[in-house]
Image (spheres, helix red, strand yellow):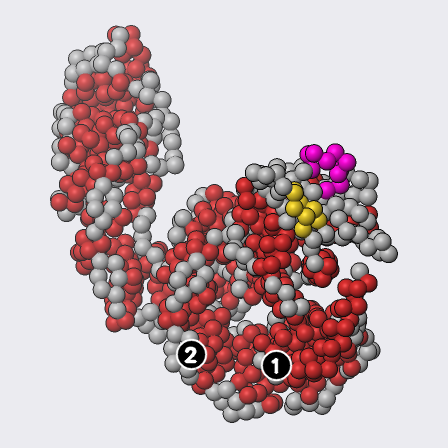
Amino acid sequence: MSNNNNNNKTDLSITTTTKDISHTTTTIIINSKDEIFLKKILKDFHNKIIKTEDFNNFEKFFVEWMKLKFEINEKDPKKFFDLMKDLKFYYDNNNNNKNNNNNFIWFTSLMGFFYQFGIGCMMNEKSALDLYFLSVNKKNHNDDDDYDDDDDDDEIPSLTLNDDFNNKLCLTEENRNEFNLLKNNNIIIGKYFLSLYYYKDIIIFNTINMMKILKDNEFNIDKQMELQEEHICINNNIIQDSIKKLKSEENTNYNMNNSIINKKKISKKEFENIKQSALKGNSKAQYNLGICYMDGIGTTKNKIKAFEWFLKSENKYTINKNKNDEFNLNLKLAISGNADAQNNLADYYENGKIINKNEKKAFEWYFKSAKNGNSLAQNNLATFYLNGIGIDKNEKKAFEWYLKSAENGNSLAQNNLAICYLNSIGIDKNEKLAFDWFSKSASKQNNLAEFNLAYCYLNGIGTIKSKKNAFNLYLKLGNLGQKDAQNNLGYCYYYGVGTHKSYYINDDVFKSFFESASKGCDVGKFNLGYCFKNGIGIEKDEVYALESYLEAAESENSMAQNNLGYCYYYGIGTNKNEKEAFEWYLKSTKSGNLIGQINLGICYLKGIGIDKDEVKAFDLYSKSAHAGNGLAQNFLATCYLYGIGINIKDEKKAFEWYLTSAFTKCDKGRYNLGYCYENGIGTCKDEKEAAKWYLKSAKAGNLMAQNNIANCYLNGIGIDKNNNKAFEWYKTSAEKGCILGQYYLGYCYENGIGTVKDQKKAFEWYFKSAEGENPKAQNDLGDCYHYGIGTDKNEKEAFDWYMKSAIAGCAKGQCNLGYCYDNGINTNVNNGKAFEWYLKAAESGNASAQNNLGFCYQYGKGVKLDYKKAFEWYTKSSNNENAYGYFNLGECYYGGIGIDKNLEEAIIWYKKALNNGIKNAEIKLNNIYSLYKTKLTIEKIERIETS
């Protein structure tokens, strides 16, 4: 090793031991110019990295910077890469030299950077990572006391290098200060690039205000959590209504242990006790005595005495005098064992016809009639067992009696038996058998069964889906005046279910709902209200809409109750009344409506008609979400994302609920799931999955998803680039009212993306979006007026729209408003206001504003002159790839403005400015080359000679 005795510096002259057949040793001396350059570039690289604030263009910027460094100094990057890779500094013989304890690999991070981006070599990502790990691995650091590693990371994996990395450039310590400086530079560079490799997305995402990103994409609470309106719906609940009828909430729990009907024999003493009680006027005993005589229980059968005692048992009750003969006749026939009369008698007791209502006696007579083979009585007896009427509930016995009645050909029982199979009542669920029994019942023209059969066809229950068959059944029943079928027929016409959907069919939609509502169908009334509200088949009339909703709501229709809340909140057909809105949402929630429950949550969240309570809002969303409502699942996810009603945000749970919501086919859930995948929220970033879910949501009609899938097609995010498809989706989104879609459609027309350039149409769509209060569109509309794009130039309009955009927080609008004040465009020149608006825009990351702000500080325009701040803002503008920022930063380095003069840096920035269209940069570069080239050469030679 050769050292300069006058300067105690670490020298890069090396000795390498080459092990070949002759075991020769070769000494290689590095050129001192190359030594200085290699050390300097490591230091400069380190200094640039630690001053970096914006990591969005980090890699691109430093690759360009590194290449320009070599170009300006007329160095060959390949030569230096080979030098770092192949030369050895006491490395191979390290084990043989016990005194060489301070070996350190100085340039591994720089070599890793070269490998990662193919500077002077072929790109090799694996090798780059190996070298970054080698840079930060503590085993490769010396253990002297001056090395203080506060960031000691035991989790860094041990490094195994490929064979071609056995030889690495190593330097030994000759001078402690320079040695430690270069060593630490290498470590820091390695850590930066290793961190960026694994965590770049997280680092970049966390350096940007998350709420700003969400706002730019209209992903905010107000847009996410809008009050929801119920839309035209089908009456899918007729089967459920039948079940409710069959399975009444009432349970009389009659104890039949003491009933004579269950006894075939009693003792003579028991018979005498009943008789004595009957003689004393006990009506129950009189009734039981009648049974004894009728069935010969404890005595000889005697129909005449049976009839007399049955009549006596009813003497204390009023028998309808006009129907007395009918009752007496059926009683006599019933006593004689006539099954039809027994069923009739049971019906009298069940419904209080002729005789006072008595469910226990009704059960007993149905039981006798059923035993005697009456199929109607068997059906009725099953219903009594099912609902616990006059007897304890017993679903198994209910099923058995429905089966007997159905097999005896009773169409009512066949329908009810199908419901048992469908809903596991007394038997395991079997959709195929349910469909078969509905079909048998329907074949006997049972309207209820036909309706239920249509439900099966519509939903593919026990059969292949057939919307056409469902429609035909609804049409048949509707023509017969069945109110629920008329409602469902309207639904089919509206959505094109089993029939063609067209504009003209709206007349049939309205007519069907009107007829259904007129016959008292609550769902029909609800749908009629929706037609009036939206002008479907009838002229729009919000007052009639409110009235129809109110009629249905007062009949406990939860959908109508929800929509009444919607009307009161937005003042549809009535004055706006948030308290009334809250009350109706509360009623809808109590009626079990999940949409009503969601809206009630929004009321608590936003303080609509009630004090704000985020915890209650969260609880309501949670209940609806766990009940399987996709929209509620989406809202619950948003609560987790923003920390609404909970102590801490939880992006992972937010993602999980968006995923759950997406699989319920909720278009909002699908959109938000795509957003999570695109931005790595609660999951790994996956642009392909993002595009997939955006597309699903877009096809379901979600306007923001339509806009975002267009973005994906435009930029090739997770999907192949396709300008035509991007344009079509922007157009779809825009025409349906999405203000972002309108903005981007204008952008497409302005720039000819997926369509022919059309500045007039661009202006029109910017205008629509701007009127929808899109700040970006307001700015671009200002540009249209300022430059005469698609309209006449109008500085006043330009200024006004820039002002709106700026106030709304658009950085471009703020910058342009600052420019107006700076240059007196439709206003007096006002440097103070110009500075204020430039500052707002610059702090939001606008590169042009950052450059303009630097100019203000450099020349004291609207602010006190400050060269250091001017330099800082020019640097930020350059980091955001602003061409004027490049040029002005070159000026700073050239003239020593806020920074020490540095011609190499000046050349780098002037070159970047020139490459980005700034012609003045070429003049500056020519001046430097012509006036200072000799001086530069002399200075370099002097530095070399003194080193």
| Picture residue at 64% right of the left edge, 49% below the top | 87
Residue 599 part of the magenta-drawn span: no
Mark 2: secondary structure: loop
| 99 drawn magenta | yes
Which of the image's four quarters has the C terminus? bottom right
| Residue drawn at 42 percent across, 70 percent down | 730
Above or below residue 654? Residue 746 is below
Indicate left or right for 867 with 789 as reference.
Answer: right
Residue type, numbered disc 2? Gly
> Residue 528, relative to residue 541: is it above or below?
above
Residue 208 coordinates in the image, percent (x, y): 63, 60
> Which residue lies at the image location 70% right of the left edge and 85% below the top edge?
822
**Mark 1 or mark 2, whichever is nearer to me:** 1
- 790 displayed left or right of 933: left
Amino acid, disc 1: Ile
Q: Nearer the viewer, residue 822 or 233?
A: 822
Q: Kindly give the residue lying farthest to the front in the view shown.
A: 22
What is the residue that sits farthest to the right in this orientation? 6
Task: Please tell me whether residue 340 is drawn above or below residue 762 in the rendered image.
Answer: above
Q: Nearer the viewer, residue 202 or 252?
A: 202
Q: Which residue is mark 1?
A: 918
Q: Is residue 502 visible?
A: yes
Mark 1 or mark 2, which has the lower sequence index?
2
The x and y percentages for residue 37 are 70, 61
Q: Is residue 900 left or right of residue 375?
A: right
Provide the residue designation for mark 2.
752
Q: Magenta stretch mostly in which secondary structure?
A: loop
Residue lying at 71% horizontally and 44% vertically, measured from the top left: 104
Q: Position of residue 680 (x, y in %)?
A: 53, 52
The image quarter containing residue 887 is bottom right
Q: Tell me the CA gap for discs 1 and 2.
A: 26 Å
Using a 10 Å C-alpha cutoff, classify the residue at mark 1 as few (fewer than 14 neighbours), some (14 to 19) or many (20 or more).
Answer: some
